[in-house]
Image (tube, helix red, strand yellow):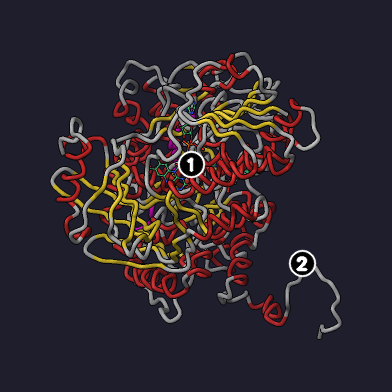
Amino acid sequence: MDIAVVGGGPAGLYFAILMKKADPSHRIRVLERNKADDTFGFGVVFSDATIAEVEGADEETFREITRHFVHWDDIEVHYGGEVLRSTGHGFAGMSRHTLLRVLQERAAALGVELCFEHEVTDLSELAWADLVVGADGVNSTVRALLDERFMTGIDWRPNRFVWLGTGKPFPPFTFYFRRDEHGLWRVHAYQYEERDGEARSTFIVECREETWRRAGLEDATEEESAAFLERLFADELAGHRLVTNRSIWRQFPTVRTAAWSHANVVLLGDAAHTAHFSVGSGTRMGMLDAIALRDALAGRPLPEALAGYEAERRPKVESLQRAAQASLQWFEDTELYMEIEPLQFTFSLLTRSLRITHDDLRARDPAFLERVDRWFAAKAAEQSGRDVALRPPPPPMFTPFKLRDMTLENRVVVSPMCQYCARDGTVDDWHVVHLGSRAIGGAGLVMAEMTDVSPEARISVGCAGLYKDEHVPAWKRVVDFVHGRSPAKIGVQLGHAGRKGATKFLWEGGESEPLPEGAWELVAPSPIPYVPARSQTPREMTRADMDEVIGDYVRATHYALEAGFDFLEVHMAHGYLLATFISPLTNERTDGYGGALEGRMRFPLEVFDACRRAWPDERPMGVRISATDWMPGGIEAEDSVEVARLLKAHGCDVVDVSAGQTVHDQKPRYGRLFQTPFSDRIRHDVGIHTMAVGNISSWMDVNTILAAGRADLCVLARAHLFDPYWTRHAAWQQGWEMAWPDPYRSVARYTPRFEFRFTGEER
Ligand SMILES: Cc1cc2nc3c(=O)[nH]c(=O)nc-3n(C[C@H](O)[C@H](O)[C@H](O)COP(=O)(O)OP(=O)(O)OC[C@H]3O[C@@H](n4cnc5c(N)ncnc54)[C@H](O)[C@@H]3O)c2cc1C
Ligand SMILES: Cc1cc2nc3c(=O)[nH]c(=O)nc-3n(C[C@H](O)[C@H](O)[C@H](O)COP(=O)(O)O)c2cc1C
């Protein structure tokens, strides 16, 4: 096969090596616009785990690369006048220059034709090739020439960064956080080489756009920037100079492409996708692409091979891009974390991409983790006024948490989940068993489902209610069981379905299918149906309607108190009545209850205030919000911060941070812990307690979220449908003792085995 590789970076060269090695009869030409020894930047990083992935592909290259490695295990964080160190991270660095030289030499030795100072500007010059590989980096010409096929999306991130070098040795990977009159500066520094007894290190400086402008760096030359940063980091550099090499201030572009190939042209490495430098994976991603493309091409026709390559690599790349997004967000939001103590700050930094969990740190650096857990336990003891063991400290999820006079035994919450099996709002034995078993299952707080404040406030005819006297004893049975038979607390979520009311059950006809008969009139801030062609158009609420709804909420609050609930949550999320007031997509009012956020929040806050007045002072209240509508023009993360600020000012104790479901054509970005970043932001920006919810399913994630300060409580829904004893099982797996109810004490002498293979050694 005749192959043209455009771009002689790591991805293109490595692919050329692998293909030539796989079949020496391939004619491969690498076209590189630079000279052989030109290179921007300084070092590249690989982690121990990731370099192993390329070992088998070409052992000669692997040996040569690893021969030049500078290894380090520790990460050091300089912040708030303290230096914190965590070990066990296993990274290696090398010079990008050396990496390219190793790859060029290997490619040449195998017979790859290397053409330097050859810039490709038109694909017609590559008509000789059976396969054209666009490995020409982040600003790929190949991609641009076929952009109507590849459909590139470039997300230019707001922070500014500059890539510099220094002779200062950095035995550990080092982060500096330094504030001056212009703002906060972050440094990512690591050593990649030692030559002639002198260290060579990469020194990347990153800051917010406004910090960069305030410091006057907008018009600074490379030398002026370096001189400014040398002065700023004089203490850290200890007399070492900063070296430039095309060290211009940039913004990071996250590149995503809808397709990676067209006809005989395929993209590789940064040309197809990028991941922020703070996850240090760009070079490795390009090399893994090269391996996958080589494998896909083995014995398959070209179109099938290129499709196979993308099918193999895309999910992995997208997963890494999600991690990189979380990581870059952390560095964009670092200003928010400046109030937290150095130990928690470091833990938050180490776990920022969500790929390293609390439990991973236990394996990597048990001493560091024990310090974090002890610190967290001491804070929990102070916050709750309870004694908490410190030697050994409990896992973060098993620490108490106090809101007003309610103290929770642990930080796990059963999320409210509609059961759709009440009769005219009256709950029954199902609810006693459903909520009761989850209380026995160990969660600190069990939330009853969305419970409606009037018959017209229901989503379906099976919804639970608190709108008439007979609802109270039915709920009281549930509450008394939970209080009598478990240490759990129980809360209720008061809701009004608004325009999403009068629908069939979920399992009868999909989401929001209107009732064919017996539907009641719907009300909403504006007469906009949920699904235009299908749903009932709600009536625009009058002031009298609002007063009636407030009255319904107050009545429900009194009933909730009579039933004995410990905690009251007002449902302002998921496109129900109060949420539709908050979102500009569903509120087009012009009367003081619409318009800017203050106006849109007015009615939800009136409801909240009325409930707060009716609910005893010593009992806490929370609000569930949708932190984004996942739709342009709707609520965005920064609006939700303002929503939370207003709620705090009105005495809300905790915000339960969910997202979406406001409009039926939302475009959510699901993934593990996908809503947690909203909670993190609100908690630090507003200084209010938060609950995180959404795709939290492992106790490792719960401990990580809590210890990093991303939320005060973790709320799990489907995990609790799957396993009512989720918290107990998590305790058992972590070796944390959780007392069983008396009738179940025999479990102490039982060894759970979900799988069993006879080995002959069983007792
Ligand atoms: C500040 C910073 C720090 C980074 N740190 C790391 C790190 O620690 N670890 C890591 O793995 N990655 C890191 N990266 C990312 C890494 O540099 C890239 O992901 C990696 O180089 C991608 O390899 P590539 O071969 O796809 O593209 P590149 O390395 O960009 O190579 C593309 C090549 O194509 C050539 N070219 C471009 N257009 C043409 C054309 N029209 N004709 C001919 N030639 C052309 C270019 O000259 C270049 O040599 C970092 C990136 C930045 C910005
Ligand atoms: C069966 C079911 C019913 C739900 N009912 C409610 C509800 O009544 N109120 C609410 O705020 N969210 C409700 N949700 C959403 C969950 O509380 C939770 O926010 C969502 O499932 C994401 O959490 P998870 O990933 O842990 O499942 C429901 C979810 C499920 C699966």
- For disc 2, the marked residue is 754
Alpha carbons under labels 2 and 1: distance apart: 33 Å
Residue 314 x %, y %: 62, 37
Q: What residue type is labelled 2?
A: Phe
User: Under 8 Å from ligand 2: the CB of mark 1?
Assistant: yes
Which residue corresponds to the image point at 59% horizontal and 64% vertical from the top-left? Answer: 727
User: Under 8 Å from ligand 2: the CB of mark 2?
Assistant: no
Q: Do the residues labelled 2 and 1 touch (CB within 8 Å)?
A: no
Tell me the quarter of the image containing the C terminus.
bottom right
Which residue corresponds to the image point at 53% horizontal and 70% vertical from the top-left? Answer: 363
Query: Residue 619 lies in magenta, yes or no?
Result: yes
- For disc 1, the marked residue is 658
Q: Which of 116 and 385 is in front in this view?
A: 116
Residue 684 x %, y %: 32, 49
Residue 10 placement, left or right of 336: right
Which portion, as a residue range, is magenta? 618-630
Query: Residue 476 lies in magenta, yes or no?
Result: no
Query: In this rendering, is residue 161 above or below 169?
Result: above
Which residue corresponds to the image point at 65% horizontal and 21% vertical from the top-left? Answer: 262
Foreground: disc 2 or disc 1:
2
Q: Is residue 418 visible?
A: no
Q: Mark on residue 350?
A: none
Residue 455 x %, y %: 56, 33
Residue 494 placement, left or right of 740: left
Residue 402 placement, left or right of 160: right
